[in-house]
Amino acid sequence: MKIAVIGTGYVGLVTGTCLSETGNNVICVDINETKVQQMQAGVVPIYEPGLDVLFHRNIAQGRLTFTTDLAHAVKEAQIIFMALPTPPGGDGAADLSYILGAAKDISKLVTSYKVIVNKSTVPVGTADKVQAVFAAHTDVEIDVVSNPEFLREGVAVEDFMKPDRVVIGTRSERAQKLMNELYGPYVRQGNPILFMDERSSELTKYAANSFLATKITFMNEVANLCEIVDADVDAVRKGIGSDARIGKRFLFPGIGYGGSCFPKDVQALAKSADEHNYDFQILRSVMQVNEKQKTIIVDKLLKYYKGDLKGKHFALWGLAFKPETDDIREAPALYIIDELVRQGATVTAFDPEGMANVKGLIGDKIKYAENQYEALIGADALLIATEWSVFRNPDFEKMEESLSNKVIFDGRNLYDLQKMIDLGYYYNSVGRKLIYN
């Protein structure tokens, strides 16, 4: 099939590349000429494990191309995916200007039947708005389909190629047939393609992300209570996760969720509820708790240093919001940095992939190390904000040589408590007993 993908951000690039892998001819469109030229030259603009292999293979075989020419892409395509940003506006509602603007541009170019697919995360009713844009600018028959993505950064290629489910919102039999043909190769293992109306599809994405954010937040609340009552959150997590009704995933406590999806999707769903005069109380609580959780390490530092962080120097391991990505959007590390600097402390950070993005955002507000051990030199304590695998089994003897004090505040519970006792560290993690040196 001939596919166009409008937008080559995270979702658009993964979508276009993975669709080309099953034999489709995919042309990706972006207005950024420099970015398009780089992709045409074989440069992958994002870090996502496994993406580069498919990217280079399908470019070499002529199935994956890039352009700034929207008219050319629209003319060739049977199905047009819109994978455009929907950032939160000032009131928290999703900004649909990119989606509706692209729909208007496409509507002036179509000359034959097309399926227009909303791949972006959008509020309920967006498909109707897109359909109205086309109706206002063309008499050509088109179908607008909602097809939300459920990609986890770090394993996005696997998620696309072997999805748990594919959700497609359309009431058109013609569009359903084309979308079923397109996604058939990805569900050969028996996972479902779920067809539903457009509004239900749109709400499914927001509901899924909001539920997972709620699950994470609940466990963070449990962890905070564990510290007060001297319980072990790891034991609690295993105890409740063994219940099939609850499940084991998204029960690991930490310093809050971040990234491009959970924060804005929870906010957008709450805003959508407000617009319909429904008080979605649990989502308001989730947002409040998560905001506080992002800087809980700083609260612990203030307690440890008796309320004064001025002149203290901290090593920070991890800047990305999660491992296996360079995405720093809403990363807890950024909130920790802001608060530490405000308190008069200094920071040297290391992250395997996220440092360039952080430096581009905050510049020389902190220092950046070449490796995780260099970050420790002269530090009063080590703070851990991202659970990269490289941090899980460090050389503790080497760490001891660089740290001014054997003090670790771990926001991701990477280390065994008994081991930290044996090594003589002051070890403060999330929801587990304090370990003193």
Image (tube, rainbow, N blue to C red):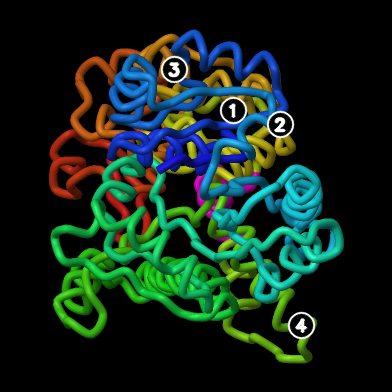
Question: Which residue in the protein does label 3 denote?
Answer: 375
Residues shaded magenta = 291-307
Viewer-nearest residue: 354 or 118: 118
Dot 4: few (<14), some (14–19), or many (≥20) neighbours within 10 Å?
few
- Mark found first going from the N terminus, 2 or 4: 4
Dot 3: few (<14), some (14–19), or many (≥20) neighbours within 10 Å?
many
The answer for how far apart the CA atoms under marks 2 and 1 are is: 8 Å
The answer for how far apart the CA atoms under marks 2 and 3 are is: 18 Å
Residue 390, x across and y down, in percent: 26, 27
The residue that appears at 24% across and 15% down in the rendered structure is 398
The answer for how far apart the CA atoms under marks 1 and 4 are is: 44 Å
Question: Which residue in the protein does label 1 denote?
Answer: 312
In this rendering, the answer to whether 371 lies above or below 316 is: above
Label 3: element kind: helix
Q: Are marks 2 and 1 in contact (CB under 8 Å)?
A: yes
> Which amino acid type is marked by label 4?
Asp
Q: Quadrant of residue 71?
A: top right
The answer for how far apart the CA atoms under marks 3 and 4 are is: 45 Å
The residue that appears at 27% across and 37% down in the rendered structure is 425
